């Protein structure tokens, strides 16, 4: 298939990624069932988990390739290579949901809750919740390992893999480093504990999301196609700025969006006590009594009235407007960086449209 650059993450594009993942996981199911029929449950849950999503990371990697190669004709080997980003993403999300003690993801029970329910239905021994968490961690590990297998065995030419592989290895380290910094910020431990909360939140955003969602996938694709260093640098600036805008939009949705928009609990970021730039800015701008009020609400279960109070405090502080301005500034910076790169017309059209979707999304 030849995806449409004007609709770069179309249903057809997502279906092609799904086809790659389904085929890979079916091969894994056959392998695992040979060890024990019970292991089919792992691939069943994995296949169900990766069946949805926006497929942004594969899209940025694919269109990065098109942007650099100068043609919409891409080798078939690109598809499993870019689809590996989705397996990596799935494994990281499973771990993230365990760390956040989240109940839902994309409107469905999280993986650890599914395994917890399976334990209860099977009348298993021990604590169902602990079993669920352990299984989600192990399955997340499997998906991260399998993502490396998928990209390594994709069939990319040796020279293309040599150029692109460094971005694959970078992103796997960076996203986990960002997770560590996020935990340090949430629990207020570690070497960054005494630093400015907004600066720490910005660093977490950059390492955990910005590089991992946009910058490294688009550089991976472009490098595989043979992009020069100047183009890779320009796409790096594009990806970093757009990735920030993407996460800042996510921070706003994580506080203000309804469950039917995001498939996540209401005001989930506040309930979980995530030290986002939005929360850091709100706490900075509020006066002492209202700051103490907001601090007293976040990081614990809240009633509907308490959620409304917390949202009102964030809004009245001016932090939401400040974040919207940052999103606009980063979006403009991303488009400027894109304009400086030598790219094919289809690639430029697709990356520009993906940028718009990242900034204007409502889920």
Image (cartoon, helix red, strand yellow):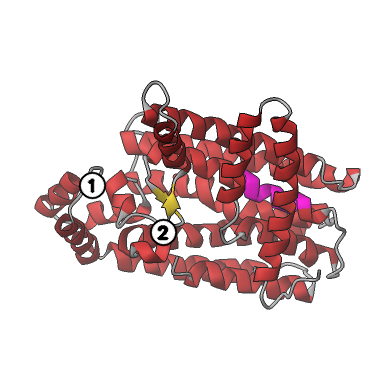
Task: Choose between 335 and 1: the one closer to the eye.
Answer: 1
91 to the left or right of 201:
right
* One can see residue 233 in this view: no
Q: Main secondary structure of the magenta part?
A: helix
Residue 165 on the magenta segment: no
Residue 87 on the magenta segment: yes
Q: Quadrant of the C terminus?
A: bottom left
In the rendered image, residue 120, in percent from the top left (x then y), is placed at 39, 33
The residue at 36%/25% (across/down) is 127
In the rendered image, residue 335, in percent from the top left (x then y), is placed at 60, 71
Q: Which mark is residue 162?
A: none
Q: Find disc 1 in the rendering and name its residue.
A: 298
Label 2 with label 1: CB-CB less than 8 Å: no
Looking at the rendering, the stretch of residues picked out in magenta corresponds to: 80-88
Specify the quadrant of the image occupied by residue 101.
Answer: top left
Specify the quadrant of the image occupied by residue 233.
Answer: bottom right
Q: Quadrant of the N terminus?
A: bottom right
């Amino acid at each position: 298939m030849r995806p449409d650059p004007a609709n770069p993450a179309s249903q057809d594009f997502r279906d092609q990624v799904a086809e790659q993942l389904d085929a890979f996981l079916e091969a894994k199911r056959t392998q695992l069932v040979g060890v024990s029929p019970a292991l089919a449950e792992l691939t069943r849950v994995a296949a169900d988990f990766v069946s949805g999503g926006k497929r942004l990371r594969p899209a940025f990697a694919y269109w990065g390739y098109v942007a650099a190669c100068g043609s919409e004709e891409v080798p078939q080997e690109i598809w499993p290579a870019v689809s590996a980003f989705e397996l990596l993403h799935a494994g990281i999300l499973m771990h993230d949901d365990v760390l956040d003690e989240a109940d839902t993801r994309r409107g469905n029970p999280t993986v650890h809750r599914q395994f917890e329910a399976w334990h209860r239905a099977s009348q298993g021994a021990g604590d169902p919740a602990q079993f669920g968490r352990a299984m989600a961690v192990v399955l997340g590990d499997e998906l991260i390992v399998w993502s490396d297998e998928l990209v390594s065995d994709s069939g990319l030419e040796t020279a293309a893999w040599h150029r692109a592989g460094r971005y694959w290895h970078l992103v796997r380290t960076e996203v986990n480093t960002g997770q560590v910094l996020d935990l340090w910020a949430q629990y207020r431990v570690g070497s960054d504990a005494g630093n400015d909360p907004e600066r720490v939140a910005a660093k977490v955003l950059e390492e955990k999301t910005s590089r991992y969602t946009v910058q490294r996938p688009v550089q991976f694709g472009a490098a595989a196609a043979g992009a020069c260093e100047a183009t890779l640098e320009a796409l790096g600036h594009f990806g970093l700025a757009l990735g920030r805008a993407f996460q800042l939009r996510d921070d706003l949705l994580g506080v203000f969006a309804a469950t039917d928009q995001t498939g996540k609990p209401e005001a989930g970021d506040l309930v979980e006590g995530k030290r986002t730039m939005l929360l850091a800015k709100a706490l900075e701008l509020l006066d002492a009594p209202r700051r103490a009020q907001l601090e007293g609400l976040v990081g614990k279960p809240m009633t509907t009235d308490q959620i409304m109070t917390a949202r009102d405090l964030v809004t009245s502080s001016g932090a939401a407007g400040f974040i919207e301005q940052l999103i606009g500034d980063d979006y403009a910076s991303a488009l400027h960086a894109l304009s400086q790169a030598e790219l094919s017309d289809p690639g430029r059209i697709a990356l520009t449209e993906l940028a718009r979707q990242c900034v204007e999304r409502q889920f």
